[in-house]
Every structure is written in C-alpha cells, then in structure tokens.
Image (spheres, rainbow, N blue to C red):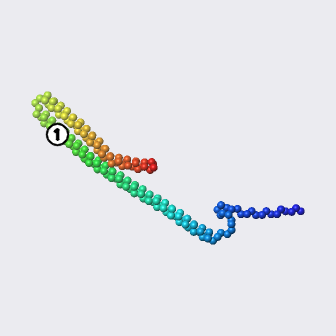
Amino acid sequence: MVAAAPPPEPAPPAATPDAGPQAGPVPPHAVADATQAVPAQARVTMETTMDQVAKTTEGLFKAAEEAAEFGRGNIEAITKATQVYVAGVQDLSKQTLAMVQGLADHTVAGAKALGTVKSLKEAADIQATYTRAAMEKTFSETAKLQEAALKLAEASFAPISQRMTLAVEKLAKPLAA
C-alpha cells in the first residue's frame, strides 16, 4: 500500500485591513473607547449638519426678504410713474384747452374784423391774414404739445426704467460671481 500524504496544515489567519492583525482577544478598554468614539462622531456629524441647515435657512430667509424688498421697490416705481403720468396728462390737457381757447378767440376776432369790411379785397386780406396767423399758431402750439408729451413719456417711464436696470444688475451679479 501506498502511504497517504499527511493532510496540509491550516494556514495562519491573514491580517485584514479593517481589523488589523489577529493578535488575540480585544482588551476591554478598547471596546469602551470605540463605543465612546461612535457617539462623539455622531454628535460632530449632527452639529455639522445642523450648522449647514441653519446657514441654508438663513440664506433662504435673506433671499425672501430681498425679494420682498425688491417687490416693494417695483410697486413704488409704478406708483411714482403713474403719478407723474397723471399729472403730465392733466398739464397736457390744460395746454390743449388753452390752445383751443386761443384759436377760438382768434376766430372770433377774425369774424368781427370781417364784419367791418367795406370791400371784397379787404375781406380777402383779413381772411388770409387771420388764416395764416391761425395756422402758424396751430403749428407752434402743436409742436409744444408734442415736445411736452415726449417729456411726459420719458419722465413717467424713468422710475420703471431704473427698476429694470436694477433688476438686470441683480440678475447679472450672480452670473458674474
């Protein structure tokens, strides 16, 4: 008979990176240190998380306050623009009424002058003079009204334009950073 080879001896346990070398039983103070380290680490993690939550919440509240303040500024700008527009329209209406009144007075004066004429040539001269004066006055007053209307449009849009500029600056600021 052939003799069987003796069974191989078991290999010594290999060291694992997590557990370290197998050197025997774990001392009791190491277990106590490990159990104290876990709550301390959890506490540090919890404190860090709470700090981050507090900072995030503070940032959200600040953003909400800024948005509310910006909204109030927009309402104020619209209110101011409306006030300027209404006051300007009232002024334009007064100027227009004055122009119409002046033209009516001019027409009455022309009619009175025509009532005193003694010849057809004199009537034609008076009519031409009054018509020319009325046309010149109409063009002059219309140009003044157009200029006033343009200034009114610029003045009433200025507060809104300023808010739009501010909005663009606020939106561009985070992009530039």
> Left or right: where does residue 78 sit relative to residue 139?
right
Which residue: 65% across, 69% down? Answer: 26
Which residue: 82% across, 63% down? Answer: 6
Residue lying at the far bottom in this picture: please name it.
Answer: 28
**Element carrying mark 1:** helix
Which residue: 33% across, 51% down? Answer: 77
Residue lying at the far right in this picture: please name it.
Answer: 1
Which residue: 68% across, 65% down? Answer: 22
Residue 53 sits above or below residue 31 on the image: above
User: Where is residue 17 shown, x and y percent of the image?
Assistant: 65, 61
> Left or right: where does residue 82 sit relative to residue 100?
right
Q: Quadrant of residue 29?
A: bottom right
> Dot 1 surroundings within 10 Å: few (below 14), some, or many (20 or more)?
few
Q: Quadrant of residue 136?
A: top left
Q: Which sits in the foreground, 111 or 28?
A: 28
Quarter in which the N terminus is drawn: bottom right
Q: Which sits in the foreground, 91 or 116?
A: 91
Residue lying at the far top in this picture: please name it.
Answer: 121
Q: What amino acid is found at the position of numbered circle 1 in the picture? A: Asp
Q: Quadrant of residue 115?
A: top left
Residue 110 sits above or below residue 49 on the image: above
User: Where is residue 75 shown, x and y percent of the image?
Assistant: 34, 53
User: Where is residue 117 shown, x and y percent of the image?
Assistant: 11, 32
Q: Which sits in the foreground, 74 or 21?
A: 21
> Left or right: where does residue 50 sit relative to residue 102?
right
> Left or right: where does residue 107 sit relative to residue 19?
left
User: Where is residue 44 shown, x and y percent of the image?
Assistant: 53, 64
The residue singled out by tag 1 in the image is 105
Instruction: Count how many numbered circles sit on residues in the image.
Output: 1
